[in-house]
Amino acid sequence: MTITQLKYVLAVAENQNFTKAAEKTFVTQPTLSMQIQKLEDELDILIFDRSKKPIELTDIGNKIVTQARNIVNEANRIADIVDQQKGFIGGEFKLGVIPTVMPTLLPMFLRNFINRYPKVKLKIEELPTETIIERLNEGHLDAAIAATPLQLENIKERPLYYEPFVAYIPENHALHTVQKLTVSDLDLNDMLLLEDGHCFRDGVVNLCKTNRNYEDETFSLESGSFETLIRLANEGLGMTLLPYLHTLDIKDSEKKYLHHFKEPAPAREVSILYHKSELKMQIIEALRSTIAGVIKGAITFQNVEIISPLPQKPR
Amino acid sequence: MTITQLKYVLAVAENQNFTKAAEKTFVTQPTLSMQIQKLEDELDILIFDRSKKPIELTDIGNKIVTQARNIVNEANRIADIVDQQKGFIGGEFKLGVIPTVMPTLLPMFLRNFINRYPKVKLKIEELPTETIIERLNEGHLDAAIAATPLQLENIKERPLYYEPFVAYIPENHALHTVQKLTVSDLDLNDMLLLEDGHCFRDGVVNLCKTNRNYEDETFSLESGSFETLIRLANEGLGMTLLPYLHTLDIKDSEKKYLHHFKEPAPAREVSILYHKSELKMQIIEALRSTIAGVIKGAITFQNVEIISPLPQKPR
DNA sequence: TTTTTTTATAAGAAAAATCAATCGGTCGTT
DNA sequence: AACGACCGATTGATTTTTCTTATAAAAAAA
C-alpha cells in the first residue's frame, strides 16, 4: 500500500469516475485502474462497485476512503512541519468566506496580507456556511471565515471579531423615533430578510424569535444583497438589520436611518474555521493575526450578545 | 514520500543505527541509506545527525519521526479495518500486564481466549505501568492490562473489574480481632509493602494517606511478591494488603487471617489500555469480552471506592 | 598502525509504475 | 436492432524506482 494509491482512491471516490480522476491526478486512466486494482488485490476486497453508474463505493470502500483521507492529510502535514521549521509561509491556501462577510472584510485585510506574506497564493471563494463545512471536512478548503458558534466535531473555530446588528429604519416607520433600540422592539413580520441560505438571515430570525414565538411563515420580501434590502426599506416596505461593517460604507444621506441597539447589542461572532488536523497552521495563524490587526481599528464592541447563526428546525 | 520511507526512518530512529535497522526491516543497509537520503532531499532537511555516535535525530527529525509514527499507525489501520469487515480475528497481538495482575488473571482467561480465537498469536509480557505506557505510545504493545485511572492523553482505558484490597492480619496483630476493617484502621508504618515501582504499592500508600498525612519515609521491609509479604506478616513483622484475586489461592490454614473491608471497600480498578488510534480494536474487544466473561463469576463487588494507582509526588 | 565497525556510493538487476493503444461492456439514441 | 458515446479493463512497451552486491570512505576500537 502506498500513499499514491490512497490518493488515487480518493480522487476516484470524489469524481465517481476514473477518467476524470485521472485528469485531476495528472496520470492516465489505466494507471488509476491498475493501482487501485493492486490495492484491492492486496487488501483482498473491492473498494468500488463498478457495476453502478456512476461508480459507487462499497461499504468497506467507504471506510477505507475515510481512513485514506486521514492518512493523506497526516502525510501532507510532514511538508507542513518542514515549512514551519524553515519559517516558510507560502504555497497555495484556499479560504472560504460567507457572502455577508466577503465584501466588507476582504478589502480591509487582503492588501495587507498579500504584502506581508507574498509567497502565499490565496484562493478565496465566496460560499455559504453549509458548503464551507463540507469542503473543510474534505480538505478542499484550508480555512474559512464564517459566523459562529457552530461547534462541529472536526472543525475548530477561533473568533476574529464580534459584529453587532444595526437596524435600518426608514423615515415613515413606526420605530423611526425610537432612540436606542432593544430586541423586544423587533417584529419579524415587518423585517426585510436576505434569501434563504444566508446565515445572517438565520441570525436575524433567531434574534426576533427570542422575542416572540412565531410560526414558520413564508416571507414575501427577500433579497440577495443588503443594497436591495435598503432600497426596499426606503420604499416603505419595512425595516431591516445590517451587520455593522456594512453600515460603514452606506450613503451619507441614508446614515440617519441607522439605529444602534442598546447594550448589550445583539451581534454575530465571526470566526476563522479550520480542520482539527491543523494543516497549514502557520498560514492560518498569519491570516488570523492580520485580520485581528486591521479589525481592531474598526470594531471595538465588547458588550454584545452573540446570536446563533444556525437555522432552528421547525418542531 | 512513501510509507516505506517513513518506516525506514522509524527503524533507524529506534535502533540509532542503519545496519541494525536494515536487519529489522529485512532490507540491506544501502537501501536504508538511499531511501532516507531521498526523503531528506525531497524535504530538503536532515532527519539524522550522522556526525554523532550513535546516530541522533535532528530537531526537525524528531518532529518528523513523531508524525511518521502517526502516519504508519494510521496506515496499518487500513489492514485492520479490512480485517474487521471480514470478521477476521487473528495475527500477532502484544499484550502487557502489570506484575500484580499477571499471575492471577492470566490463568483465568488465557485458555479460554486461545480456544475462542486460535488465530491470534498472543505475546504477553509482564511490565511495570511506566514501561507499559511508553510501549503503548511507541506502538510496541497493542494493549495492556493495568491499574487505572491513569487519564493519559493518548491512551484509552476501559475498566475490566474492580478488585478490592483485602487485609492480611496475623494472629498476634493489634487489629486481628477487628471484624470489619475500615480505612481509618490502617497505619502505613505497620504495613508491609511491595518494592518500589509496583503500582499496587502506590495504591496502598495512597490508601493509607487518605487517613493521615505521612512524611515521605523509607520503608525498611519491602518485597517483590505477595508470597513473601505473607510470610513476613506471619513472622509478626506487620500486616499487609492483598488484591482480592490473590486471596483466592492462599493456603487454607492462612485464610483465617484475611480481613475484608467494610463497604465501600477500597479497590483498584483494573482496565484494559490501548492507544487512542484503536489499532486492532477487534482483538482488544475480543480480549475484553473474554476477560469480562470469566471475571463475572469470580468478582462481584459493586460498592467499592477506587484508589488511584499513581505515586503522589512529594511536595 | 591495524582492525573493526559503520555509513555512503556505484553499478547493475529486478520490480514497479506509467503510458499509448485498444478492447469490451453498457447505455442512450435513432 | 444498430450505432455511437462513454467508461473501465487489458496489453505490451517504456521509463522510473527500488533493491542488491560490491566497494569505498570515514570513524572508532584494538
Image: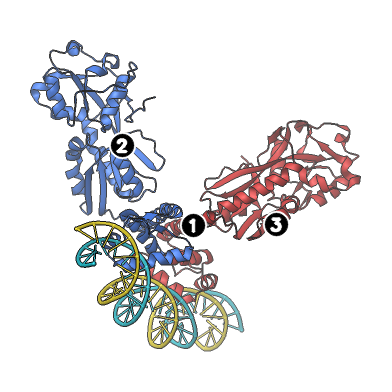
Chain colours: A red, B blue, C cyan, D yellow
Kindly identify the amino acid type of the residue bearing the numbered disc 1.
Asn
Asked if one can make out residue A9 in the rendered structure from this viewpoint, the answer is: no
Question: Disc 1 versus disc 2: distance between alpha carbons?
Answer: 32 Å
Tell if the residue under mark 3 belongs to the same chain as the one under mark 2: no
Q: Secondary structure at mark 2?
A: strand
**B203 sits left or right of B255 in the view:** right
* B100 vs A230: above or below: above
Circle 3: element type: helix
Q: Residues within 10 Å of mark 1 (few under 14, many from 20)?
A: some
Q: Is residue B58 visible?
A: yes
Question: Is A86 left or right of B248, judged from the image as shown?
Answer: right
Q: Point out the frontmost of discs 1 and 3.
A: 3
> B240 or A175: which is nearer to us?
B240
Q: Quadrant of residue B223?
A: top left
Sooner in the amino-acid sequence: mark 1 or mark 3: 1
Q: Which residue is mark 2?
A: B271
> What's the CA distance linking mark 3 and mark 2?
55 Å
Looking at the image, which residue is at 49% across and 63% down?
B44
Q: Amino acid at mark 2?
A: Ser
Q: Output the chain of dot 2.
A: B
Residue A49, given in percent of the width and then of the height, sits at: 43, 66
* Extreme-left residue of the structure: B253
